[in-house]
Image: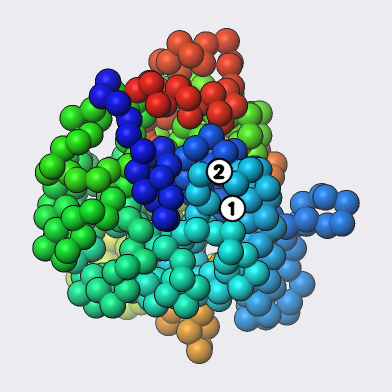
Amino acid sequence: MKPLNSIVIAGREVLPIIEGGKGISISNGQSSGAWAAAGGVGTFSGVNADSFDPAGEAIPQLYHGRTRRDRHEELLKYAIDGGIAQARIAHEASNGRGRLHMNILWEMAGAERVMRGVLDKCGEIIQGVTCGAGMPYRLSELAAEYKTYYYPIISSARAFRALWKRAYHKCAELLGGVVYEDPWLAGGHNGLSNSEDPRKAEAPYPRVVALRQVMNEAGLSQTPIIMAGGVWWLSEWEDWLDNPEVGPIAFQFGTRPLLTRESPISPGWKKRLLELQPGDVHLHRFSPTGFYSSAVHNAFLDELEGRSDRQIAFSAEPLGAHDTSLDLGARKKPVYVTAADKARAEAWIAQGYTESMKTPDSTLIYVTPPKAEEIREDQTACMGCLSACAFSNWSQNEENTTGRKADPRSFCIQKTLQNIAHEGNVEGELMFAGHNAYRFAEDPWYRGGFVPTVKQLVERITTGK
């Protein structure tokens, strides 16, 4: 492989390899600090990270407020305290080497408040902020306040052009790089647009070349592009190195750092990663954010798919083919469905899916009584972890509502990500991963359940493997 030359990131020459940020305590201070100590760029998550009590134990993120607004404020305090704690851990673990970034999601609750709260206390030890999951127009303005480099995460040249024209051109000197995240291969939430087909992946090279052309037009020819999503062995990307069409390039690894000794995920999660096969990671759209996301297909996703499969359209009055009465609930209030759909509903009821729940799209889903109770309890317990949530209809606007009916086809994302991060139930919770995660099982390096340190992984990556 060609020599892997250093690159300037956040004002310092480092290896052109970056740890991708993973939310809810998965990219923590220990893992990101170790990545920086190995000479790269470590990224800790500022998304509801863990904070600690005086004994060093993680503080459970429990909510006591009576209203969603009260719980929202509790959540933001947890997020700020956790971000500060992880930044300090990362700084200590880095031994002053590499660079440290904080990752936030623009569509998370109070993204601006969290960013300010952490940088107010730790701005001198955080060299950059990466931000995706939405269109973070104000990211440059916030970065300028703290003289911190910023790294927007985008999935198309078109998205970056919009960000540049509207806001980023005003603060070009702090634009440390642009993260291109492949929307078909990256783990977690992906930036697929409505014009792109989730079933037809597009090659990243022409999309990145298009991004570079937009950046060149804006005078950003020396600003690095960071390739994220689908990156496994650098030898497979050798033709991107020293390539004038691509320009300065670095590579981001999100899934591979999960399987390291410093990674905080559970032993069961690490074991599951070693067993994945091609096709085990699925792109789905159940997230309450409304974005597509990639996760391991397990019982959690099976249950969500089942909910949507057991779904029929209805109308409040007889309308066209919807001329067959169907009684709902204890009061037997009628709605109108097609005759075929009534037969389907009766079959589901006979199988134990006796509870019908209305969706915002004038459909009914059928679930078991315990699942219906769980959905309602989760919706009631909403703590406003997103800027807007389809599952609970929370919004952080003045009225605290999206104005739409809560959608029972989705789920409480804060609950499941906290559960898998701290309890490690890899079957019953949402398990994000990139689509190349099956390559753990194919790589002889991991044979026998070997789990490397971050330093060992970084050293191996630099060889091209």
Choose the circle earlier in sequence order: 1 or 2.
Answer: 1
Instruction: Tell me the mark number nearer the camera, choosing from 1 and 2.
Output: 2
Q: Is residue 246 left or right of residue 69?
A: left
Label 1 neighbour load within 10 Å: few <14, some 14-19, many 20+: many
Name the residue furthest right: 55
Q: Quadrant of residue 157?
A: bottom left
Q: Is residue 381 left or right of residue 384?
A: right
* Badge 2 element: loop
Residue at which label 1 appears: 24
**Residue 214 horizontal/vertical position (percent):** 14, 60
Q: Nearer the viewer, residue 127 or 108?
A: 127
The residue under the point 39% across, 51% down is 9
Q: Are marks 1 and 2 in contact (CB under 8 Å)?
A: no
**Mark 1 is on which residue type?**
Ile
Residue at which label 2 appears: 97
Q: Nearer the viewer, residue 375 or 162?
A: 162
